[in-house]
Image (tube, grey):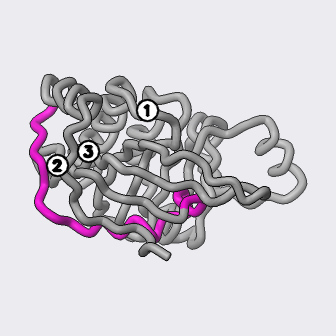
Amino acid sequence: MSSLFDTAQIASSIPEVADILASLKKEFKIEQTGHIDFNLGQFSVLKNYTDVHLLSSHAVKNKNNDSYILFTEAQPKLTDHGKALPVEQHIWALAYLKHDFGRVLIRRETLVDKIKELIHPVELDFAEDKAFSDTFYMLVSDRQKATSGADRNFRNVVMDIRLDDFVIEIVEHTLIIGNTKPRCAEKALHLAEFVSRLCTTCD
């Protein structure tokens, strides 16, 4: 069995990636990184894949610290009938945070979430920020760490995300954001905007 989450840089000549990078460079200072092990295997958002290969990673240069755009290929796990599914092409953004959040998962809240919450409250809500709590479903492993890390600045940056379908996962100091839908320039711009603002606003 091939190793899980091989993060070696793989040279990519895919025109689509080049087009996405060209769009990003119009708005941000983007530089290709050397080899960085982002430890993608720690994120539960990728648990439905047996192999995730980092094709290339690119630093989004910010005033205080860099954030990253990652192009990945992912092999979904076999279906119930043992049928192999096609490899998927994803784009993610990653940032390193000053605060230790513990483990956190944030996504837009659904009606089902709201109903479940009435029966068995599990998410972290902010009494002083009803707009955020009504909009997002935030699951945490350590309420104290998450509450301390998700201050007003952090919540405001999340509230301003212009991407409709996304998930944020934080493992201690490392945040990843994206989804498993096909990559495109518009999504890349939204992701880069989010992590760039996060690194600029949340010192």
Callout 2 amino acid: Ala
Q: Position of residue 116 (x, y in %)?
A: 84, 50
The residue that disc 2 covers is: 59
Image coordinates of residue 198 in percent, x first then y, are 30, 45
Dot 3 lies on which element? helix
- C-alpha gap between disc 1 and disc 2: 20 Å
Quadrant of the drawing holding the C terminus:
bottom left
The part of the image, by quadrant, that contains residue 24 is top left
In this rendering, position of residue 77 left or right of residue 91: right
Between circles 1 and 3, the one closer to the viewer is 1
Where does label 3 land, which residue?
201
129 shown above or below 175: above
Residue displayed at 23% across by 56% down: 10
Q: Residue at x 32, y 46 (%)?
A: 71
Residue drawn at x 30%, y 29% is 189
Q: In which quarter of the image is residue 20?
A: top left
Give left or right: position of 197 versus 187: left
Q: What stretch is highlighted in magenta?
A: 28-49
- The disc placed on residue 15 is none
Q: Circles 1 and 3: CB distance less than 8 Å?
A: no
Q: Which residue is drawn at 40% across and 34% down?
A: 183
Q: In which quarter of the image is residue 194?
A: top left
The disc, 1 or 2, on the residue closer to the chain's N-terminal end is 2
Disc 1 residue type (three-letter): Ile
